[in-house]
């Protein structure tokens, strides 16, 4: 079953980017992956079509927090999950203060990730 929600993954580590997109696709999600914030921001269609963003904090060039701030200027309340291999309580607090729905440390707990996705897309589902 293919779901209509498109999830954008931004991570400069190819193994993380590919692993996340493969995992999400195996669950039926459409994905679009980018290795940098700048690459995503140059693709207006990907920004506009995204139902959710998964963004690594430490990217080459613009960091993930800057990217998320930029997205909040372009979109109304973009749903985003911030991920990092070096996060702490301050990183978590900052991510949430920016409007992210979650902060997940790497390696990402798959059940936690899918719990956030189900919750987000259930909230976005049209009422019958």
Image: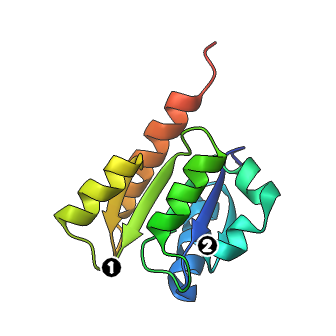
**Residue under the point 50% across and 66% down:** 66
Residue 79 in picture, x, y percent from top left: 52, 46
Task: Give how far across and how far down residue 93 sits, in percent.
Answer: 25, 55
Query: Which scheme is used to colour this image of the protein?
Result: rainbow
Regarding residue 52, the answer to whether it shows in the image is no
Q: Residue at x 58, y 87 (%)?
A: 14
**Which residue corresponds to mark 2?**
37
Q: Is residue 4 above or below residue 61?
A: above
Single out the residue that lies furthest toward the left: 89
User: Is 39 drawn above or below residue 94 in the view shown?
Assistant: below
Q: Depth-wise, is mark 1 or mark 2 nearer the camera?
A: 2
Residue ID for mark 1: 85
Q: Secondary structure at mark 1?
A: loop
Q: Which mark is residue 93?
A: none
Q: Residue at x 34, y 75 (%)?
A: 106
Quarter of the figure with residue 125: top right
Residue at 58 percent across and 61 percent down: it is: 24
Between 59 and 126, the one lying in front of the other is 59
Where 25 falls versus 5 (above or below)?
below
């Amino acid at each position: 079953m293919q779901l209509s929600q498109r999830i954008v993954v931004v991570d400069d580590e190819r193994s993380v980017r590919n692993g996340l997109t493969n995992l999400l696709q195996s669950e039926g999600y459409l994905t679009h992956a980018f290795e940098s914030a700048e690459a995503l921001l140059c693709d207006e269609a990907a920004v506009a079509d995204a139902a959710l963003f998964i963004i690594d904090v430490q990217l080459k060039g613009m960091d993930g927090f800057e990217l998320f701030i930029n997205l909040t200027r372009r979109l109304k309340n973009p749903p985003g999950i911030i991920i990092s291999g070096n996060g702490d309580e301050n990183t978590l607090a900052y991510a949430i203060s920016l409007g992210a729905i979650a902060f997940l440390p790497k390696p990402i707990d798959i059940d936690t990730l899918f719990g956030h996705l189900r919750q987000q897309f259930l909230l976005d589902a049209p009422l019958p």
